[in-house]
Structure formats: structure tokens, C-alpha cells
């Protein structure tokens, strides 16, 4: 690529006849050097800016990829936590049901034992009542016999 310095230092051979005016060529080259220098600097600045923007773009793409991976991992972790919590909840419910059934059976056994005790006490009371009745009848008979003798 031609640099502004190349344009500025360019010398043309001079012809004696029908040649270009040296002054016009020099003026034109001066104008061309100024414009070309300006464009060369702009081009160089734009290349630098493009490189910087490309680096920034790559950096942001990397950040985006990292964020996407992080989001996927967060979603997976949330799903795993949810599944573990559900399993734990199911386990707690099953244990609670098992404990409730065990307690119900224990209470039913206690009720059956208390009912059996109640039946035994009722039988004992009936026996006691029958014995007392028998005693009272025999005492009444004794009193009648004592009254007859008097």
C-alpha cells in the first residue's frame, strides 16, 4: 500500500517537450498527500477501532456463553433441588402414614384391652352381686328362723 510519505517523496522525470508543469504536478501531489494522509489516518484509526470492537465482541460472546451455561446449570440445579425436595416430602409423608398406622393399631389394641378389662370387671361385679344376693337371702332366712323360734 502506498503511504502518504511515498506520495510526498515521489519525483517525476522532467521532459523538455510537452511535459507536465512541475508546479501543477507538485500542487496536485501536495493536495493529494493532504487528502491521502487524512484518509490513511482515518483508515488506520478505523482498523484499530475494528480490532478493539472485535475483541470486545469476543469478550461479550464469552460472557454470554458463560451466562447461558450458568443459566442452564441453575435450571438443572433447581430441578434437582425440586426433585430431592419432592422425594423428601414423599418420604416424610410415608413415614407419617406408617407412624399413624402404628399408633392407630396401638390405640385399637389398647381399646380392646380396656374393653376386655371392662368385661372382666362386669363379670366380677355380676359374681359379687350374685354372692351378695345369696348372702342376703341366707341372712334373711336366718332372721326368719330366729323370728319363728321366738
Image (cartoon, rainbow, N blue to C red):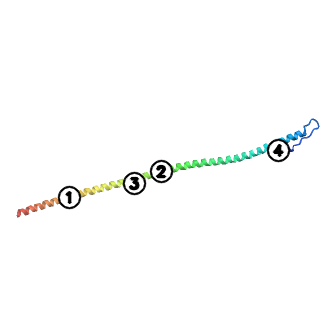
Q: Earlier in the sequence, mark 2 or mark 4?
A: 4
Q: In the figure, 42 relative to 141: above or below?
A: above
Residue 78 in sight here: yes
Q: Position of residue 42 (x, y in %)?
A: 76, 44
| Residue furthest top in the image | 18
**Quadrant of the rendered structure where residue 134 is?**
bottom left
Mark toward the viewer: 4 or 3: 4
Label 3 close to label 2 by CB (< 8 Å):
no
Asked whether, in this view, residue 56 is left or right of residue 135, the answer is right
Quadrant where the image shows the C terminus: bottom left
Q: Position of residue 72 (x, y in %)?
A: 57, 47
Q: Position of residue 14 (x, y in %)?
A: 92, 40
Q: Which residue is mark 2?
A: 87
Q: Which residue is mark 4?
A: 4
The Cα–Cα distance between marks 3 and 2, rounded to whole angstroms, is: 18 Å
Q: Which residue is mark 3?
A: 99
Q: Which mark is residue 91?
A: none
Mark toward the viewer: 2 or 4: 4
Q: Earlier in the sequence, mark 3 or mark 2?
A: 2
- Nearer to the camera, 32 or 72: 32
Asked whether, in this view, residue 87 is left or right of residue 59, the answer is left
The Cα–Cα distance between marks 4 and 3, rounded to whole angstroms, is: 93 Å
The Cα–Cα distance between marks 4 and 1, rounded to whole angstroms, is: 135 Å
Helix or strand or loop: what does disc 1 sit on? helix
The Cα–Cα distance between marks 1 and 2, rounded to whole angstroms, is: 59 Å
Q: Earlier in the sequence, mark 1 or mark 2?
A: 2
Residue at 5% x, 62% y is 148
- Nearer to the camera, 37 or 142: 37
Q: Which residue is mark 1?
A: 127
Amino acid at each position: 500500500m502506498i503511504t502518504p510519505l511515498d506520495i510526498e517523496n515521489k519525483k517525476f522525470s522532467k521532459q523538455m517537450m510537452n511535459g507536465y508543469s512541475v508546479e501543477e504536478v507538485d500542487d496536485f501531489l501536495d493536495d493529494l498527500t493532504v487528502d491521502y494522509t487524512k484518509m490513511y489516518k482515518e483508515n488506520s484509526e478505523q482498523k484499530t477501532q475494528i480490532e478493539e470492537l472485535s475483541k470486545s465482541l469476543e469478550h461479550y460472546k464469552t460472557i454470554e456463553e458463560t451466562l447461558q451455561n450458568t443459566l442452564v446449570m441453575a435450571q438443572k440445579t433447581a430441578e434437582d433441588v425440586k426433585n430431592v425436595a419432592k422425594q423428601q416430602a414423599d418420604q416424610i409423608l410415608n413415614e407419617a402414614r406408617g407412624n399413624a398406622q402404628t399408633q392407630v393399631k396401638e390405640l385399637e389394641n389398647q381399646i380392646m384391652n380396656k374393653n376386655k378389662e371392662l368385661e372382666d370387671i362386669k363379670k366380677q361385679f355380676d359374681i359379687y352381686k350374685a354372692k351378695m344376693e345369696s348372702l342376703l337371702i341366707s341372712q334373711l332366712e336366718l332372721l326368719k328362723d330366729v323370728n319363728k323360734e321366738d
